Image: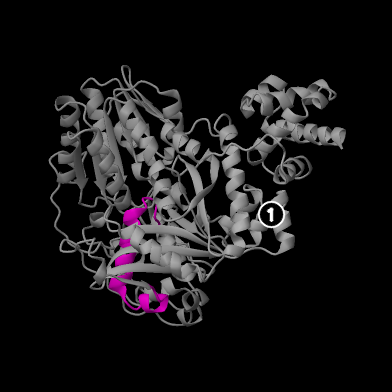
Amino acid sequence: MDANTLWVSDHIHQALSPKQARTRLGQEYSTIVFDCRHDFDLDALGAISGTLLGGGVLFLITPALEEWDLLKHSLYLQMVQSLLEQHPALLCLQQNHPPADYKIPATANEYTPPADAIYKTVEQQKIVASITEHFLHDGASPLVLIADRGRGKSSSLGIAAAQLIQQGIKKIIVTAPRLSICEPLFFHAEKNLEHSHWQRGKLSTQKAEIQFKAPDALLDEKPPAELLIIDEAAAIPLPMLKKMLHQYPAVIFSSTLYGYEGTGRGFILKFFKILNDYTDQWKKLSLQSPVRWAENDPLENWTDNLLCLHAELEDVADIDGRASEDFDIQRLDKNALIQNNTQARALFALLVSAHYRSRPSDFQFLLDNASVRIYTLSYQQKILAAVVINAEDGFDAQLAAAIYKGERRPSGRLLPQTLCFHGGIEAAARLNYSRIMRIAVHPDLQRQGLGSYLMKAVIQQEAGLSQMIGCSFAATSELIHFWKQLGFELVRMGFTRDHVSASHSAIMLQATSPQHQLIFQQLRTKFQNGISYWLNDSLKDLQEDLKKRLITESQAGDNQISRLDWQDIESFARYLRGYEACSPALHKFITQYAEQIELLDARDQQIINSRIKNALSWPETVQQCGLAGKNQALKNLRAAIGRLLQLIS
């Protein structure tokens, strides 16, 4: 092993943790040692394997296969076990056993070098010519470049950027989830621009520059540019991409088709629709020929099969999605599913198409987690729609109380925790929930009622298995309407934007039995009563259509402080409950006891008036009160409310 060897392990000194694997995308290694004795991180393996150069070697460190506990307990690994035991690309070295004879699998050896030495393939040369021609002569309509990994996508963009600058373009901005992803682009741009200077994130010539901007900074600062290049666009939330599309005159969207910055197929289905709505003049380019390894590479084939990357959707051209009498709805037997490779891959393909940030570990979770239940709607054994349920059991009374106070945050079990801590109903943490994780309908059969038809059947079956059924999703007015039609009601909106979807999350819920209606109604009423305050404070940046939707959900409660309000007020002051969840009750409190606030010292009055009465943001409150930061402001506000409680008691 030479110096260009990467070790990946949580148990080997100075090795890269699997959790950091994606930070090495865009780099290249001649040897990779991947430790999967204690855990098999499929996402890390997928990310790392694509950085291996042609002719390189990937070592997997495992126990003896018959002693490998992971293999025994993982349905996913059992499904792909043959790939771990025998494959043309695989040589198994065992302790105290001489290695078997091994012959490197044959690969296509035909290679036609392009006329110009700066390119690795003739195809790459043609793609660069198409990019430059498009922006220099065909106008500024968007361009999309897609490819599998290792096809020279980033290097093509770098060469094209250099040529566009040579043709007179002065300012190009590049954005991506991380700067490290763009380093090959900058490397090839510098290589093809004379007298250019590249420092981290910026390449300059005498007359032009290429600059990196993180996606959020790009949208906040709006720096001018003649061309925006978005590398690994599938890893950037669609709402952000849509803003970039409208913000810049010329844009290249580049995405890995089967990759680990967000699986590309689901992204493409959704993003192409956005482009079609924007203009019919956009252009798609694709790269097929690998540049880091040969065609039909044995390791690439092995990895694709292991991670189910090329699972294809069912052909449904002859199916009418409205002919419900012949549909078969069933809860899948996972043990039977892993014996039916065709069905398993069709299910994975369907789930990927519906969610543009799917990863191989998502499928591993579906198969290996006993709390996950999978329902499908099929026609003549073709899966047309699927629903994935995660059973989330409630907590015991002691842990529920600690969660409510903000003292404990156990991993997992989203609904019981969120509805307890943020929803403000401690009893909600003690119930059992069926959380709808995914709902997917074949792209060619959408908007024909299949999702609703399957979901109604799932609700009936899940009603006997849990006390509440709920879902958490990136909120849109359309999705809220969909779930309301199925009998769900809004009980929470997230107060910050999710980093993946760039949207506020929503939770909708329905109780499955009359004895749990009281807790459901408490959650529902608290949410409805708080909407009008939140829309002027924590949710004031919501999109207008969502604001209108929430206004129809709001309920004007009286100004009297209810029992549940008192619980919010006291738990905020005495424990670690979040401010935003408690803010409607706190606003009632300071309104009703305005005279008593006059008895507090000036600092207490200032922070109460700034944050609660005037609904200033945290940064504005910090500045007005002369504090060090949000944490200090929150601490001071808790103390001030605590002293006000003492005054009135």
Q: Amino acid at mark 1?
A: Glu
In this view, the residue in front, 273 or 3, is 273
- Camera-nearest residue between 598 and 3: 598
Is the C terminus in the top left, top right, bottom left or bottom right quadrant?
A: top right
Residue 457 in the image: state x and y as whole percent. 39, 67
Residue appearing at x 59%, y 55% in the figure: 520
User: Does residue 573 sit above or below 194 in this rendering?
Assistant: below
Residue 590 sits in quarter = top right
- Residue 194: % across, % down: 28, 25
* Span highlighted in magenta in the image: 331-359
- Please give left or right for residue 496 compared with residue 168 in the image: right
The quadrant the N terminus occupies is: bottom left
Tell whether 528 sits left or right of 259.
right
In reply to whether residue 72 is colored magenta, the answer given is no
Which type of secondary structure does the marked residue at label 1 adopt?
helix
Q: Main secondary structure of the magenta part?
A: helix
Question: Horizontal and vertical percent for residue 526?
Answer: 62, 44
Q: Is residue 104 left or right of residue 92?
A: left
Residue drawn at 78 percent across, 34 percent down: 641
The residue positioned farthest toward the top in the image shown: 207
Colour scheme of the rendered structure: one colour
Q: Nearer the viewer, residue 29 or 493?
A: 493
Query: Where is mark 1, residue-wise?
Result: 426
- Against 580, residue 455 (above or below) is below
Question: How far across and how far down the image is residue 32, in percent?
Answer: 42, 59
Asked if residue 582 lies left or right of residue 42, the reply is right
Q: Please tell me in which quadrant of the rendered image residue 557 appears.
A: top right
